[in-house]
Structures are given as C-alpha cells and as structure tokens.
C-alpha cells in the first residue's frame, strides 16, 4: 500500500469514498458536480485543499483532505483536517496513523503549529484512534449556516 497525494485519475474513487464516509457518519452526500468541484479545489490553479490517498494497486482504499488555516488566538497557521476515512476492511492496519504522520510532516514543512479536526461524538472508534495517536479533544458545538 502506498500513501501519496491524489492524482486527477483518483477523483471517481475519492467521490465513492466520500459517499461511504458520509453514510458512516450518518450524513447525506450529493454526488452531483463533485468531480468538477473537487478537481478545482484539489488540482485547480488556485487549489486550496490537499488530498492524500491510500492506494492499493489500482484501488483507493482511504483518503484524507486538509488545508492550511490561520488561528488568531495562537497567532499562527495550523492544518485543518477536514476528512480522514478508510474502508472498513482497511482499518486497524496502521494506515490512519501513517496518514496522520504524512499530514504532520506537511504541517511542519508549512510552519504550522497544530493540526485540528473533528469527528461526531458517536464515532467511538475514531475518538479512540485519535486519542491513541495523542490527539486531545475540546468540547465545542459545531454550527453551520447555509448561504
């Protein structure tokens, strides 16, 4: 298995994994226009999202997306991990830890001070994994405002 930055040819499989991820987190996912939008945000001229994939031969079995952001409180940049997902039969093999190591390497290279992320409070396996790798939790409510 190989962890690498996504390539355009990976987009159909990444979209499939996004749909699985949404289902896993009990959320809805609309596939419409995702290929065009993800292509622009990950590979476009002004790309703002980084995407790592876990590739096994010609199959993408996991992905992580993240971006650099700024914290006023900390007066420094950080990495926001938007998604990390592995197919069910790929969990427990150290791939999640290896993805996080790659993201940490990227964060250090970008002079970021921390990596932040969130997961639903019912996702006990993810919470246990994140604690195992040294993550700490902040109690906050997540809000969204439709535009």
Image: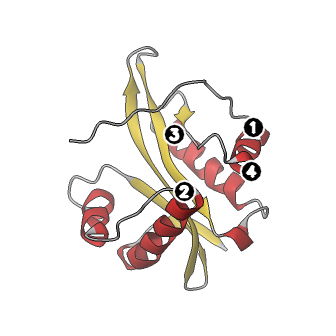
Q: Nearer the viewer, residue 115 or 20?
A: 20
Give how far across and how far down residue 26 sits, in percent: 54, 56
Mark 1: secondary structure: helix
Report the residue marked by disc 3: 107
Report the residue marked by disc 4: 125
Report the residue marked by disc 2: 26
Q: Residues within 10 Å of mark 2 (few under 14, many from 20)?
A: few
Labels 1 and 4 touching (C-beta < 8 A): no
- Distance between mark 2 and mark 1 Cα atoms: 22 Å
Quadrant (top left/top right/bottom left/bottom right) for the N terminus: bottom right
Q: Which one is in front in this view, the residue at disc 3 or the one at disc 4?
A: 4
Q: Which one is in front in this view, the residue at disc 2 or the one at disc 3?
A: 2
Q: Residues within 10 Å of mark 4 (few under 14, many from 20)?
A: few
- Distance between mark 2 and mark 3 Cα atoms: 30 Å
Report the residue marked by disc 1: 131
Labels 2 and 3 touching (C-beta < 8 A): no
- Between discs 4 and 2, the one toward the N terminus: 2
Labels 1 and 3 touching (C-beta < 8 A): no
- Between discs 2 and 3, the one toward the N terminus: 2
- Distance between mark 3 and mark 4 Cα atoms: 25 Å
- Between discs 1 and 4, the one toward the N terminus: 4
Mark 2: secondary structure: loop
**Is residue 9 placed above or below 27 in the rendered structure?**
below
Tag shown at residue 47: none
Q: Quadrant of residue 94?
A: bottom right
Q: Which one is in front in this view, the residue at disc 4 or the one at disc 2?
A: 2
Q: Quadrant of residue 6?
A: bottom left
Q: Nearer the viewer, residue 57 or 124?
A: 124
Labels 4 and 2 touching (C-beta < 8 A): no
């Amino acid at each position: 298995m190989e962890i690498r930055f996504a390539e355009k040819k990976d987009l159909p499989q990444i979209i499939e994994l996004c749909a699985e991820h949404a289902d896993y987190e009990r959320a809805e996912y609309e596939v419409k226009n995702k290929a065009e939008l993800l292509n622009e945000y990950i590979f476009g001229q002004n790309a703002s999202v980084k995407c790592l994939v876990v590739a096994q031969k010609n199959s993408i079995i996991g992905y992580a997306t993240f971006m650099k952001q700024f914290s006023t409180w900390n007066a420094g940049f950080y990495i926001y991990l938007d998604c990390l997902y592995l197919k069910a039969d790929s969990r427990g093999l150290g791939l999640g830890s290896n993805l996080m190591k790659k993201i940490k390497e990227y964060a250090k290279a970008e002079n970021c001070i921390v990596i932040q992320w969130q997961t639903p409070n019912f996702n006990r396996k993810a919470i246990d994994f994140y604690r195992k790798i040294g993550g700490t939790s902040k109690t906050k409510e997540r809000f969204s405002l439709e535009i």
